[in-house]
Image (cartoon, rainbow, N blue to C red):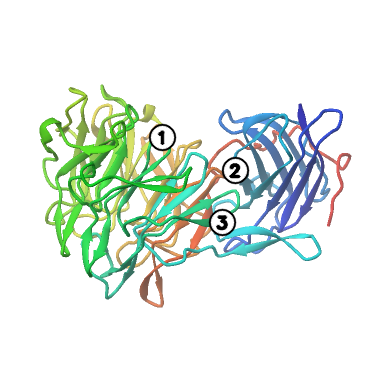
């Protein structure tokens, strides 16, 4: 069974429409594919666009199932037959005269199966390496379609919220705080800002539609919490700060969101974490699906205590625990604002958690690394201190990302702030197979409180936003890995952010775009919590039509150009 495309239409700078219709003899499925482009920041037009390539691909295998290319001058082409299958995508690329891709977009994954009703697939394209506001298609009164750039935004500005990508590609955004100059001050919030209000809001973003929809509110407003996707598809929400009778305190009760039903499940006090905490980490173990909570701050009447405790959420029991006999699992010293990365090597493969950097009880950045493990006894956790492994530079406000080379044994530790409060441009790469720092690289712009997003098909990392303490960094960098030198080399993205921001969220979506939302921005010299959302086209290296691979260079025999 096949799906056939009968015609291709290119509306320059606006839309490319492929009307895919069933063939009576083949018994195919009707698929309407619409491709549209928002006006990306700093990109005036597509005057240099020379050739368009369109492909249907199988996402996980990276196999190109059907592809077509045609020149803009000829304006004619058709997508050949596409076999039925699962996890399919439509990929669109536009090249300049020298064959360099300048525009790209891909649909969210979809299934095309015998007996399906007709499908409608949208592809949001944009200029590669640029930020832009979201966009949607709308229908005019005469029945024609047009592209509407939309500044999608939250109902309220927020920082310290969480973004969790579900397995179906949607993104859940939870909580956050409005940060103001006269809000309640706390360590972990820079720029002399404080918490003015805390939100209980829950929203879900659908990349296929490009829209947010509300979810039932959390029971407890919270910010600077963790939201962890469990193996069963639920989201575990732990800790954070809230305002109780006007005082800033940490939230002890945990909650579970079932995205399938849209319902919240409260974990009872007796089964909840022993300690309320914020600015902590929560890491899912691959071996058993349990979650390891490490460190953070506890606030009581606004007074902070940096924690040295570790708690485990046992997914099989649906409760938190320490070691048998209620024996606390403790770090060698208190730690908050650290990073935690699941290790891929060792006896506890997919179970050991490496804790990296952060601040101590006095708020001073540290270089220590520790491993939380139960490799020696499945029922008992312990904290190991690799004597040979420490960062060259103590840091906080950094990111840490396990990277593909070296069978996943390499971890990139990026940016942050040193013990003097200066922003760092250095990158340190930890080799966890030998437990030492092997090399690194440098960012073009020193920054902390940024976001790092992995592009899994390319080994690249995208570093987005942040601050150098003097000002916000309104730019992104693409870090490419040099395996021979065991280092990352950065190159600035082509376009700046719509809004420079820090303490924001960023996540790679199934359509290859990075969703950037919330955080703190600057307006006329004053800082404010942002409600704005933007997208970044990083070109995630997912299946695409490579230059010269098109096997259907159409010259007008299979379609008509519509103006």
Q: Which residue is mark 2?
A: 108
Q: Secondary structure at mark 1?
A: loop
Across and down, in percent, residue 525 comes to 37, 76
Q: Is residue 536 visible?
A: yes
Q: Number of labelled discs?
A: 3
Q: Residue at x 22, y 45 (%)?
A: 273
User: Which of the 4 image quarters holds residue 318?
Assistant: top left
Between circles 3 and 2, the one closer to the viewer is: 3
Q: Residue at x 78, y 46 (%)?
A: 71
Q: Nearer the viewer, residue 551 or 504?
A: 504
Q: Which residue is mark 3?
A: 211
Quarter of the picture holding the C terminus: bottom right
Across and down, in percent, residue 17 comes to 75, 49
Q: CA distance from mark 3 to mark 2?
A: 14 Å
Q: Nearer the viewer, residue 231 or 537?
A: 231
Q: Secondary structure at mark 2?
A: loop
Precedes in sequence: disc 3 or disc 2 = 2
Precedes in sequence: disc 1 or disc 2 = 2
User: Which of the 4 image quarters holds residue 25?
Assistant: top right
Q: CA distance from mark 1 to mark 2?
A: 22 Å
Across and down, in percent, residue 348 comes to 26, 25
**Circle 1 Cα neighbour tier, 10 Å, few/some/many (<14 / 14–19 / ≥20):** few
User: Which of the 4 image quarters holds residue 429?
Assistant: top left
Residue at the far bottom in the pictured view:
524
Precedes in sequence: disc 1 or disc 3 = 3
Q: Which residue is mark 1?
A: 232
Q: Secondary structure at mark 3?
A: strand
């Amino acid at each position: 069974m096949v799906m056939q495309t009968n015609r291709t239409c290119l509306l320059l700078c606006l839309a490319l429409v492929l009307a895919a219709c069933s063939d009576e003899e083949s018994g195919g499925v009707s698929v309407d594919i619409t491709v549209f482009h928002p006006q990306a920041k700093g990109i005036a037009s597509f005057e240099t666009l020379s050739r368009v390539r369109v492909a249907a691909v199988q996402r996980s295998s990276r196999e190109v199932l059907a592809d077509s290319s045609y020149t803009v001058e000829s304006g004619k082409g058709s997508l050949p037959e596409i076999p039925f299958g699962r996890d399919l995508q439509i990929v669109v690329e536009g090249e300049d005269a020298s064959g360099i891709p300048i525009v790209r977009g891909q649909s969210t994954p979809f299934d095309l199966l015998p007996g399906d009703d007709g499908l409608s697939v949208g592809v949001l394209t944009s200029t590669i390496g640029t930020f832009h506001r979201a966009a949607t298609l709308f229908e005019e009164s005469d029945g024609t379609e047009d592209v509407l750039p939309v500044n999608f935004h939250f109902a309220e500005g927020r920082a310290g919220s969480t973004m969790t990508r579900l397995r179906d590609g949607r993104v859940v955004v939870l909580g956050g705080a409005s940060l103001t100059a006269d809000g309640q001050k706390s360590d972990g919030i820079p720029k002399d800002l404080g918490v003015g209000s805390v939100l209980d809001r829950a929203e879900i973003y659908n990349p296929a539609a490009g829209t947010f929809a509300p979810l039932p509110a959390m029971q407890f407003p919270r910010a600077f919490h963790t939201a962890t996707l469990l193996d069963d598809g639920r989201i575990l929400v732990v800790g954070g700060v809230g305002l109780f009778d006007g005082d800033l305190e940490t939230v002890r009760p945990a909650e579970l969101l079932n995205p399938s039903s849209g319902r919240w499940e409260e974990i009872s006090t007796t089964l909840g974490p022993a300690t309320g905490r914020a600015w902590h980490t929560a890491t899912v173990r691959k071996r058993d699906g349990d979650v390891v909570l490490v460190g953070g701050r506890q606030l009581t009447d606004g007074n902070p205590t940096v924690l040295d405790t570790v708690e485990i959420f046992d997914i099989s029991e649906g409760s938190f625990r320490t070691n048998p006999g209620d024996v606390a699992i403790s770090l060698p010293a208190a730690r908050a604002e650290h990073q935690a990365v699941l290790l891929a090597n060792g006896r506890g493969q997919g179970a050991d958690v490496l804790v990296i950097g952060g601040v101590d009880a006095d708020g001073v950045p540290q270089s220590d690394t520790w491993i939380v493990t139960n490799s020696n006894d499945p029922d008992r956790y312990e904290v190991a201190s690799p004597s040979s492994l420490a960062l060259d530079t103590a840091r906080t406000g950094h990111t840490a990302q396990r990277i593909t080379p070296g069978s996943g044994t390499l971890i990139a530790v990026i940016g942050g702030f040193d013990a003097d409060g200066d922003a760092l441009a250095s990158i340190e790469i930890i080799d966890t197979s030998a437990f030492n720092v092997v090399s690194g690289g440098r960012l073009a712009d020193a920054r902390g409180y940024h976001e790092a997003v992995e592009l899994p098909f390319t080994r690249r990392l995208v570093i987005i936003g942040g601050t150098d303490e003097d000002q916000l960094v309104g730019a992104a960098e693409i870090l490419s890995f040099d395996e021979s030198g065991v280092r990352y080399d950065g190159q600035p993205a082509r376009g700046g952010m719509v809004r420079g921001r820090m303490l924001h969220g960023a996540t790679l979506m199934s359509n290859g775009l990075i969703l950037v939302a919330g955080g703190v921005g600057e307006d006329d010299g004053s800082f404010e919590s942002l409600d704005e959302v933007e997208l970044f086209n990083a070109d995630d290296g997912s299946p695409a039509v490579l230059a010269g691979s098109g096997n259907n260079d159409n010259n007008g025999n299979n379609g008509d150009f519509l103006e």
